[in-house]
Amino acid sequence: MTFHGVRGSTACHGEETARYGGNTSCVVVDAPDQPLILFDLGTGSRYASVAAGREVLCLVTHLHWDHIQGLPFFPPMLDGDSRITVCAPSPLDGGSLDETMASIIRAPMFPVGLDAFPARPDFVGLDGGSVVISGVSVSSVEVSHVGKTFGYRLDVCGVSVAYVSDHQQPMDGSGPDPKVVDVCRGVDLLIHDSQYTAAELASRPDWGHCTPEFAIEVARASGAKHLVMFHHDPDRTDRQLDDLVEAHRDSVEPRITVAREGASIALGVG
Ligand SMILES: [Zn+2]
Ligand SMILES: [Zn+2]
């Protein structure tokens, strides 16, 4: 698994964010004899390398810009022989996901329309629950955010991974939603929103995110073995993220790490 984009909201650059990286959400799961799986298509998806002829399955949590903006720059989009499936929550207005995506990728917002790309992605609207897509067992659950948003769980090659990139923390102090805890139950790896400090959350109580402490609550409630803090605020500096690493260095249940662009985690190995 490789992190190609770890930021939330918008891409960023500069000396203070260079080490952890500035691209928006994209995580690649590369498992043997499986399609290449991408969680989200943020600006980081431009850096995902896809072998010619490899099938690609993209699991998009929701359609906010930071999760889809990379699609027109995703390398297989220029390959007419590529096989790309893009899953996302079904649009709330009853329209199709293809129409929604085509309405975003077109002039004047983009130089050409979606139909001008050599690739013809298959767009699949999901409504939650467990399905097998492209031979991969995928579970999705609606999570509290701003607009319809999924968290995903994958079970591939005996390894389980949950991805909850954007998650509104309850402001009444109540614990995590049992449905979200269920989908994350016992996973080997949980990648979870950790965007705000407590002070930021207090000033942005309905912007759809949570603190690292809440991410730990979700991980503990679900028995996740390893928590990766993710979807860093674009204002979060490398030094602050180093502090987060340091604060949780000794945690064992769960093990806690902080997502960094370009970093890989080997799962089910050794
Ligand atoms: Zn986001
Ligand atoms: Zn969002």
Image (cartoon, grey):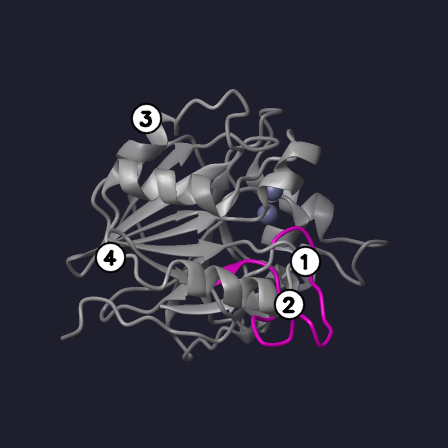
- Left or right for 130, reference 263: left
Q: Residue at x 54, y 63 (%)?
A: 241
Q: Residue at x 62, y 37 (%)?
A: 201
In the rendered image, which residue does mark 2 sit on? Answer: 22
Please tell me how crowded label 2 is: few (under 14), some (14-19), or many (20+) other residues with Cα within 10 Å: many
Query: Per the image, is 71 magenta?
Result: no
Q: Comparing marks 2 and 4, which lies closer to the viewer?
A: 4
Please tell me how crowded label 3 is: few (under 14), some (14-19), or many (20+) other residues with Cα within 10 Å: few
Distance CA(mark 1)–CA(mark 4): 28 Å
Marker disc for residue 85: none
Distance CA(mark 3)–CA(mark 4): 23 Å
Marker disc for residue 252: 4
Q: Quadrant of ligand 2?
A: top right
Which of these two is toward me, 252 or 115? 252
Q: Quick check: marks 2 and 3 in contact, CB under 8 Å?
A: no
Residue 5 visible in the displayed image: no
Q: Provide the residue span drawn in magenta.
A: 8-27
The residue under label 3 is which amino acid type?
Pro
Q: Residue 215's quadrant in the figure?
A: top left
Q: Quick check: marks 1 and 2 in contact, CB under 8 Å?
A: yes
Secondary structure found at label 3: helix
In the rendered image, which residue does mark 1 sit on? Answer: 234
The residue under label 1 is which amino acid type?
Pro
Give how far across and how far down residue 205 sits, in percent: 64, 30
Mark 1 or 4 closer to N-term? Answer: 1
